[in-house]
Amino acid sequence: MGKVVLYAIFVDTKETHPWTAYDINTTLDSIKKSTLWVTSKAKKCNIDVSIDIKFHQNNNVIPISQNLYEETLSRTLFPNIVEGIENLDDWSNAIARKAGNSFGSDPSIIVKTKNVITDRERLIARLRDLNSTDNVVVMYFLNNYHQDEISLAIHTGISDKTEYSIVSFKNPAVIAHEFLHIFGALDLYMSPFDRKKRALKNKVKIMEAYPNEIMAFTYRPIENLDLSPMTKYFLGWTAELDEKSKNLMFGKKIKIYKY
């Protein structure tokens, strides 16, 4: 991973609780706790990771107002997931344009085409320039405490679209879970995206085998969670997948790539 910038954007919507100074500060504390947890786990695997937390603010005003298409995150995403993701992409791009106003014009003198922030991809490009790193994670935070809501990472593992996360809660484990998705970690719990019975059965076995896995159990204190050999492999922190994890995830017939 190397140097990583976690760029947090706090978003107010009509249906979520308005962000207060207390809410923002405690969420930033949770973000810091989650990143310290990630870097400590990386260090144990001899992986060099430093995470710099930055957040949007424009003239000391932090939240950006942008209503979701269907009032709430879950209603926007379901039941038509393809259309839901398209709507969330539009939503995130609108926020990125507003966040871009805080940067001003591109000051670069070595390129002919200036980077005008029109969407999420252009925002990430500017953040890469400003922080001199390829590793930029944009996370949108909604104030959904005490609500039955979801958090998710979008476009992970897709090369032609920029990934991002939407987080509904200030739980450090949830933040770390969505952050790790951006770098290749997979959901190891039964999710609405699992359509096949075999995949669901495998997830049950995985959850039983790794009862402290952060990609399977997010709503627990983060200090009680860990990374399984499976997640370490998907993150690229280990060179190969151990036999137990391989059989749980893919069965015995599939050959797994070694880094």
Image: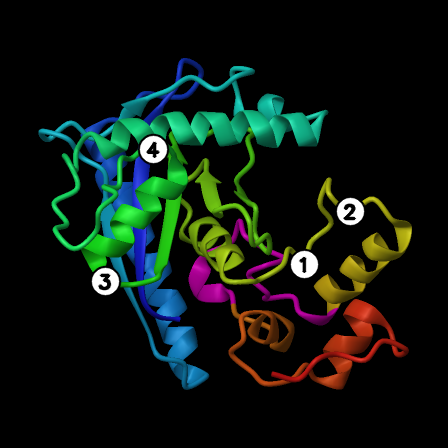
List the residue tagged with mark 3.
132
- Above/below status of 49 relative to 62: below
Which one is earlier in the sequence, the residue at label 2 or at label 1? 1
Q: Quadrant of the N terminus?
A: bottom left
Badge 2 amino acid: Asp
Badge 4 amino acid: Ala
The front one of 17 and 57 is 57
- Above/below status of 246 relative to 89: below
- SS at mark 4 in the image: helix
Q: Judge left or right: residue 69 versus residue 56.
A: right
Which one is earlier in the sequence, the residue at label 3 or at label 4? 4
Q: Quadrant of the rendered structure where residue 199 is?
A: bottom right
Label 3, label 4: how far apart the Cα atoms are: 19 Å
Frontmost of labels 2 and 3 is 3
Label 4, label 1: how far apart the Cα atoms are: 30 Å
Which one is earlier in the sequence, the residue at label 4 or at label 1? 4
The front one of 152 and 113 is 113
Which one is earlier in the sequence, the residue at label 2 or at label 3? 3
Label 2, label 1: how far apart the Cα atoms are: 10 Å
Q: Are marks 2 and 3 in contact (CB under 8 Å)?
A: no
The magenta segment is 209-225
List the residue tagged with mark 1.
188
Frontmost of labels 3 and 1 is 3
**What's the residue at 59%, 52% (across, down)?**
158
Q: Bin the neighbour count of mark 2 within 10 Å (Cα to Cα): few under 14, some 14-19, many 20 and up.
A: few
Residue 202 numbered tag:
none
- SS at mark 1 in the image: loop
